[in-house]
Image (cartoon, helix red, strand yellow):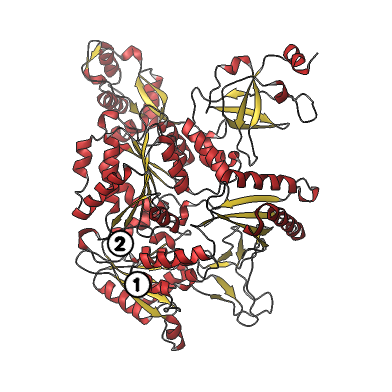
Amino acid sequence: MALSAFFCLSLPTMKYIEVILPLPLDGLFTYAVEDALVDKVDIGVRVSVPLGKSKTYIGVATCTPHDLTPDQMVDAKGKTIEFKKILSVMDSKPVLLPQQMKLWQWIADYYLCPIGDILKAALPAGMKAEDGYRPKTELYIGLTPQFQHEQSLNIALDVLKRATKQQKAFIDFLALSHWDSLVGDNATEDIVEITRDELLNTSHTTMPVIKQLISKKMLFTYEKEVSRINSVDVSMLPDLATMQAHSKSLSEAQNKAYNQILMQMMHKNVVLLHGVTSSGKTEIYIHLIQKAISEHKQVLYLLPEIALSVQIMERLRGVFGNRLGIYHSKYSDAERVEIWQKQLSDNPYDVILGARSACFLPFQNLGLVIIDEEHETSFKQQDPAPRYHARSAAIVLAQMYGAKTLLGTATPSMESAYNAQQGKYGIVSLTTRYKGIKLPAIEVVDIKDLRRRKMMNGPFSPDLLAAVRTALANGEQVILFQNRRGFAPMIECPVCGWVPKCKNCDVSLTYHKNLNQMSCHYCGYTYPVPDVCPNCGSNEIRGKGYGTEKIEDLLRDIFPEAHVARMDLDTTRSRNAYERIIDDFATGRTNVLIGTQMISKGLDFDKVSVVGILDADTMLNYPDFRSFEHAFMMMSQVSGRAGRKGKQGKVILQTKSPELPVIQQVVRHDFRSFYKGLLEERSFFHYPPFYHLIYVNLKHRREEVVESAALELGARLRQYFGTRVLGPDKPSVARVMSLNIRKIVLKLENGLSGKQIRATLRYVQSQLLQDKRYATLQIFYDVDPL
């Protein structure tokens, strides 16, 4: 008997599905589906499945139940596979739409990461565990059925005559709920549900009083599920006329750019809006969103930083009201689950404003994607996987829906500028600031010369201190930019030169004065500050360099009258920290804001007249081919915070290298010259946008193992890619969290088959990992690294 015929006769007619599990493993997992569950399984529903001997996971079904062919039911040795059965189906309808599934697959393929890592990143935690999400409930008070008649209510009030507190609480309840409008058996007003807390607060009664009314069977309590997010009454959503009334009229320059964008979108899927800082790009976005909503389309508005969402959220909410939903990591997991569910409902948000994870939300009718500050490196996920770029993912998502994408920035990324130059993207320029505000005057200060002449006051030049003093005297505001958090980048013993290092990572520790501890900004490990040098016993240990915390302390000493605030990772850990800091600065409660790159990203303040860039060299001297690009963008962006109507802002740019062309290009606000020079350099040295980069990273606890594996992998890759392979090398930080790291770089010219490249990399990796020495070796890829 033929093998196929044997299987047809002997195997049960079980159905099977493929499931994505939230694990960093390649491929899908096949499970059997019992007859009772077959009709409940659909593409995109969550299923509970067993894995291993005792573990259970929540996965996502990628197909409907189907048969397997005989060859799919045996392993490589011809042994019949015993497929485990799914345990339960978690959803009555899909929680993942087809376009989302396609996006997940694209990210997995393009960024060379397991699709399980994408599930982990995309779904809120509450959707990845059987009991992870619990609906929020509230306690309500109701009138028992036997008193829902006019006559019985009068009897109840008579019974309560001697219990005055109970009677008052009962009367207040009847008034709030409109049960006091009973005429016979019918209420003349709509009955309103009343929460326990509402009755307590309005009636000024107590729980013992309410419990007495419950014990007398007059009232009863019940729980009701309520939303953690703004509940939306569809009838109360602002219509187009209301939205237009609450938006500002476009200036002549803005209106011209708006019309050009619409014209470009007739022929291009992606348009780049290159508008100088404070040119009013946000107002153009608002008008484009209004147009999309009028066409019954949804809009995704991506921002690089949660800090930016604070200001923009208020502007958008003022126009779009409850049509707007917010989604980012500072929201609780339960809130994110509810937003996800709302987007799948019959009344989803029309506009979603969020950070990069918002591109994973379900959209039923996406028509427009806006990526504000598109140049920002924060759009690229670094660790953990998936190491995707939200800008690229959002563009692909838009294409899947047939939607258009607008990229907005004052300093386009090299890739976007090149795509526009080559005609792949449309481009629209906005060269004037809103309401005629002038671009700031940038003054370059040579701090190397000032230090030699002993004229610096710590990190502050005389020119900067004078400008700050004048601004404060005039009731104006100041922003100081220092791209290092903490009190000092490191502490050092001046006697022997000892510098404390992290025991898990090859980096020095950053000193945080307020916490009185040293911490590693790579693994997060903290250390106590030693009283004496453990190397030589000296008690003269001191901080070296200047972090934002130290800048804050020094500034308070110099300007005791100033109200100073700091915005960095250390001061914005809580959910509302961004809002508090930004609101205090916007309303003038603080007049000096010190911060890291967070403050460079599109924040608008009316009274900022001075911006200080304390040390441009820390950005320019970073060992990376993108350092000048990132430095130009950051300096240009933070400079753009200066200036207000009727007065030109001032920027003090402190550097030891004033002669560098990039410094002069920042001073002249000359993006074109900067872009042209950098493009020539990138072409000559085979870097993006002319080449694609892939970093192949290897990690292992034992240095000799990772070294051996990296050399062998590099040799294998050269067999296929030749001189396109560079390394392996030690990265600048060669050990993180006790894992030793090696890096191989692939420089791949445009036009090569991405599919073939990825297949080759996966094949070479699988061949290497067959060696038992590398059983615990970690290999991961960073595609298009930043």
Q: Position of residue 386 (x, y in %)?
A: 56, 46
> Which residue occupies the foreground of this view, 681 or 184?
681
Tell me the residue at 37%/70% (across/down). Answer: 666
| Label drawn at residue 589 | 2
Q: Is residue 770 left or right of residue 526?
A: right
Assign a secondary structure to mark 1.
helix
Whether residue 7 can be seen here = yes
Q: Position of residue 302 (x, y in %)?
A: 40, 47
Q: Position of residue 20 (x, y in %)?
A: 60, 33
For label 2, the crowd category at 10 Å Cα-Cα, with few meaning under 14, some 14 to 19 and many 20 or more, is: few
Which badge, 2 or 1, comes first in the chain's sequence?
2
The Cα–Cα distance between marks 2 and 1, rounded to whole angstroms, is: 31 Å
The residue that label 1 is drawn on is 667
In the displayed image of the protein, which residue is found farthest to the bottom? 453
For label 1, the crowd category at 10 Å Cα-Cα, with few meaning under 14, some 14 to 19 and many 20 or more, is: some
Which image quarter: residue 317? top left
Q: Is residue 126 left or right of residue 250?
A: right
Assign a secondary structure to mark 2.
loop
> Looking at the picture, which amino acid does disc 2 mark?
Arg
Tell me the residue at 48%/72% (across/down). Answer: 546
> Which residue occupies the foreground of this view, 631 or 36?
631
* Relative to 70, residue 629 above or below: below
Whether residue 329 can be seen here = no
